[in-house]
Image (spheres, rainbow, N blue to C red):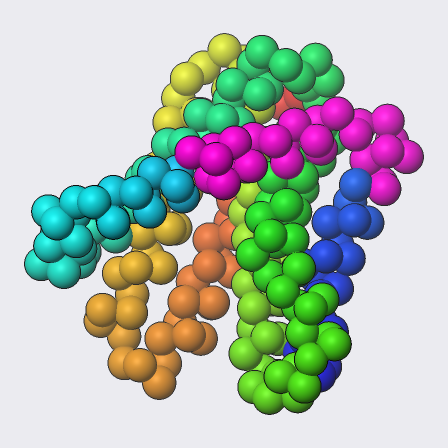
Amino acid sequence: MAGVIFTAAIGMGLPIAAFLYACFRKRYFPFLLGVLAFVVSQVLIRIPLLKYIGEHSTAFVMFSATEPVLFAIVLGLSAGIVEELARFTAMRFFMRQRDWQSGFLFGAGHGGIEAVLFVGSSAIALLFSSAALADSEIYFIGGIERFFAMLLHIGLSIIVLQGVVQKRIFYVLLAILIHGFVDALVGILPLYVPKDHVLPVLEVTLAMMALAVFNYGLWTKRKGVWQ
């Protein structure tokens, strides 16, 4: 039960807290744009498209089975392209508040709604189910993963916003590559890491990547990049 409560707090409570903070700081619009960027790019475009291709293309299914590493790279890059271009479009054409805090809250909205949709809502439902008593450590790991995923989205949002502010497409491409690399590892590592160790290896790898990208975002603030 403790694992489910923890995951519910991360997957639902943390995004709600971030939204309330955004409203308090009068930065709710960047937060909501981050939410919209994820919903449009993933929920409305990428996920339905991949589902359709998977159901109607034998070549796609065969590709996933015969070339698992390349398949993971393609899927990872597809996530990076659609999400980072959605971030760029939202920031470039709709976001007028372009300071560091707005980039932070944009990422909190983007990663927050992902956490709500993928783990937060299901964790809340599990709180009222007897299934919450089983495999609590798995739910706990899920909450940790969502926390670092949100940090990653915050860091990536700051990188993309830096590109928008400085009018340098390099930063958008960098965000696409980082995002694609992280997502590709999720599909590649299980192919080479023993089954008993794959979960901790994946989570530690995600955490290190997320912290590195997030720390870069903090570095841009300390160095006065936004002034």
Question: Does the image show residue 162?
Answer: no
On the image, which quarter does residue 103 sit in? top right
Q: Which stretch appears magenta?
A: 20-45
Question: Does the image show residue 111?
Answer: yes
Image height of 205 relative to 141, above or below? above
x, y percent for residue 62: 11, 54
x, y percent for residue 72: 25, 52
x, y percent for residue 30: 70, 27
Q: Is residue 22 magenta?
A: yes
The one nearer the camera, 103 or 70, is 70
At x 74% / y 76%, what residue is drawn?
128
On the image, which quarter does residue 19 sit in? top right
The quadrant in which the C terminus is found is top right
At x 37% / y 51%, what residue is drawn?
183
Q: Residue furthest right?
A: 24
x, y percent for residue 91: 59, 19
Q: Is residue 189 left or right of residue 2?
A: left
At x 14% / y 60%, what residue is drawn?
65
On the image, which quarter does residue 45 sit in? top left
